[in-house]
Amino acid sequence: MPFSEILGQDRAVGALRAALRRGALHHAYLFAGPGGVGKAAAARLLAQAANCDGGVPGEACGACVPCRKIARGVHPDVLWVEGERAMARAGRWEPKGGRAPSRDIVVDQVRELVDRRLSLRRFEGRWRFVVLDPADAMNVQAQNALLKTLEEPPPDTTLVLVSSSADALLPTIRSRCLRVGFAPLPAALVEERLVAAGRPAGEARLAASLAGGSLGHALALDAQALSERRAAVERAARLPPDDAAAWIAFARERAADREAARETCELLLVWLRDVLVRAVAGDGAALALADLAPVTAEAAARIGPGGALRRGDAVRGALAALRHNAGPALALERMLIGWFRG
Ligand SMILES: [Zn+2]
């Protein structure tokens, strides 16, 4: 798989290829961005391209021995460190003293896998890689243990920290890595990939709208998950747009926990985007929830583009509050106050 297969990340990929062509790889990268947008694939490609025998600088042929070994995860100079549980399941790690494996990357892994490996010479590769995926699975002790390696990096070695919540890493870790930002994918691109993977068009559009720019999340939404979400948004869409009491009752029901509240907000955003599109573009508008077109048209006529925008802003405000640990009931209530007071 060449770099061109990583879609929608031209900036990140361009920076990595330029460094490869100059032979100037940084000793530590932080691949930061939402989950499911190609960060781990880019880390694998980087390791392949740096060790490829195919003869094209800055590219991985995918066919030579090093490329194939790295793809299969068996190259001795490319170490992939994951949470204990994931590695234990793959038979690549066993916690000491019969302890049950945790979700974390623990200090023992940093010492025994990373430090010990890096104290040895390279085996067969030109450039050694250690990929921590996800890096934010490292607990504080593990991060502190990794600091030493980041401060005194061994030669011909690159560490790649893959993270969808890079801000959770210690500032001392972040400041010692070169950050490469991965962007959320455009919904149209996610939709296209889902259709190419054989998903029906309507399902692909809804999944893409709900996935927040992550192909990984979109792929994880199966037909049943989507139909449950569709039912929830349909119920909301059928509420009279200006009946505050009905909306408050709906919100109370959906505020059972933070996850339910967050998902309700995501669903409302998808639908309100449809209302806005319908209000602006009229009859021929391409809607994420095509089968709700009649109710969506009604809502568009009632609240107009301004109303759809204002409500969308209130929903985004609620999402931000939920991310900052607001209580779900309070966040949704405030959101509705924003809707009906405007
Ligand atoms: Zn190759």
Image: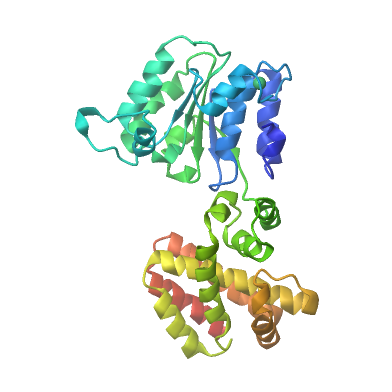
The residue depicted at 45 percent of the width and 74 percent of the height is: 332
In the image, is 32 to the left or to the right of 323?
Answer: right
Please state the quadrant of the image where ligand 1 appears. Answer: top right
In this view, the residue in front, 229 or 331, is: 229
Q: Give the residue displayed 55% in from the left and 22% down from the top.
A: 69
* 2 vs 187, nearest the viewer: 2
Asked whether, in this view, residue 239 is left or right of residue 331, the answer is: right
Q: Position of residue 144 (x, y in %)?
A: 35, 30
- Quarter occupied by the N terminus: top right
In the image, residue 274 above or below residue 194: below
Say which quarter of the image contains residue 51.
top right
Quarter the C terminus occupies: bottom right
Q: Answer yes or no: is residue 26 visible.
A: no
Which residue sits at x=55%, y=48%? 34
Residue 11 at what x, y percent from top left? 69, 39
Residue 250 x, y percent position in the rendering: 45, 82
In this rendered view, identify the residue nearer to me: 315 or 92.
Answer: 92
Vertical placement of 169 versus 224: above or below?
Answer: above
Q: Position of residue 334 (x, y in %)?
A: 46, 76
